[in-house]
Image (cartoon, rainbow, N blue to C red):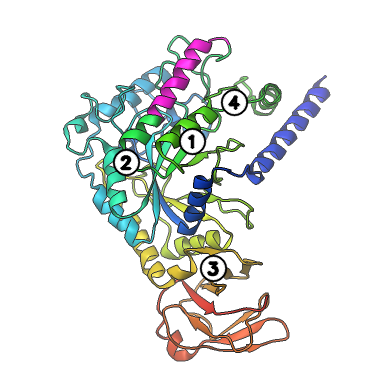
Amino acid sequence: MKKSIAMLALLFSAQLFSQAIYEDERYVPETDPLVLEKLDQWQDKKFGLLMHWGTYSQWGIVESWSICPEDYGWCERKKGSNPDNYNQYVKDYEDLRKSFNPTKFDPTKWAKAAKDAGMKYMVFTTKHHDGFNMFDTQYSDYKVTNSDVPFSTNPKANIAKEVFSAFRNEDMWIGAYFSKPDWHNENYWDPYFPPFDRNVNYNPAAYPKKWQKYVDFTHNQILELLTNYGSIDILWLDGGWVAKTPKEEIKQGYTAKFLENKSENGFIKHRVVDQDIKMDELVVKARQKQPGLIVVDRAVHGKNQNYLTPENRVPEKTLPYPWESCITSGGGWSYTPDAKYLTGRQGIHMLIDVVAKGGNLLLNVAPGPDGTWQQGAYDLLADYGAWLDVNGSAIYNTKPIAPFKEDNICMTQNKKENVFLFYMAKEGENTIPSEIIVKSINPKKGTKITMLGSKTKLKWEKLDEGFKVTIPEKLRNSLPCKEAWTLKIDKIIR
């Protein structure tokens, strides 16, 4: 019997693993012509800003997850008056709203820094899983503008509106992050039942009226954002477990997770529950408010995931659909005291790698409890801006070219069929070598090769395999940027 259970566990865990890989590789193309046009424009933008911000910033903890009763490290409770008592902890956590007063909140400064960094769009957390609303919703009192929040008397109290306006004024696209699960809402985590995991804490099939109330609540809040907050370009939905799930997947998923994740005390980390949020209906209504709206129903296979979002990782290869790596810049997704940020070299090389593979980079910066960014974030964005001022033409409005990377040299091409080679500095390198050899492509005879930021025409010669470019000493001693240098080839042999 034990052997049979072990085999079944292995079978189901293997099946789930293969499904996870497949989920990351499959894509349902959009058919709405306005959305397709907007997706093309979005893919040319390449670089965006993500911000996670909420009352949890006051404790410097991971966003929302500490109130989720799952046995994962990121759910560990460390703050509050009694972190060993779950109910007391949740009360302390929700009482953080009573001291949330980010009086140094200046979204205009953020927007300018992002634009100067070369970012073209932004995504802001209007509501995370904990259910605290960073906008003036009429459907909940658990919001930044409620009278029990000190910041509610501030002229900038409607934080999401202020953020969207500031970034829109810098001609950046606006994205609204919205959590489909809401752990504060009585129709998601019903007070009658104890929460068991991240999922709804009752069976929606057994309580259809209660679940319908939650569906209506979610639709109303999203439509509220799309009606009262100006032009929204991207609806970025999180909480992929809130979705319609086929019964067979529910059965297999629950069994597999029970067998695979059951700890010694019998605790199941999380279940698979059918939570049909009526996404198809919502998207129709949403695009009536915002025609051409890009919808990102994250981690939910189907037509409402207009682009895919690998989280905190960069795929190893080019992908045959629109995608965006969302990556933390320092600390975690939420504010971390004394966070260590990416170096300019790390950040620039990451952007090059993502773009060479055909993706966009959405870089997360987390505001602190007083409403400011840490200096490390500004420093990193300044490094991006200085580099993109020189090399932006090889990043924006480009697409991959095979093989996309050769050793430490990445490649892109633009619509004029110019090809760009990014020489990414190796460890200990502060200048580009005197000779660059590339084997995988060949320039056309007589074509011009230059370095972006320089007018010097570079000498090159064909080799038996590929070609060699010579970088003169004068240019090597006076390079136009740091960390990576871009060679522009006017034409290559196809």
Residue 183 appears in the picture as rendered: no
Query: Which of the numbered marks, if any, corresponds to residue 244?
Result: 4
Nearer to us in this view, 209 or 117:
209
In the figure, 127 relative to 483: above or below?
above
Question: Which of the two marks, 2 or 1, is nearer to us in this view?
Answer: 2
- Element carrying mark 2: loop
Q: Amino acid at mark 1?
A: Asp
Q: CA distance from mark 1 to mark 4?
A: 15 Å
Q: For this view, does 40 lie left or right of residue 156? A: right
- Give the residue number, with chain letter if any, for mark 2: 230
- Element carrying mark 1: strand
- Give the residue number, with chain letter if any, for mark 3: 415
Q: Quadrant of residue 246?
A: top right
Q: Amino acid at mark 3?
A: Lys
The secondary structure making up most of the magenta span is helix
- Element carrying mark 4: loop
Q: Position of residue 360 (x, y in %)?
A: 50, 55
Question: Which of the two marks, 4 or 2, is nearer to us in this view?
Answer: 2
- Give the residue number, with chain letter if any, for mark 1: 238
Nearer to us in this view, 433 or 481:
481
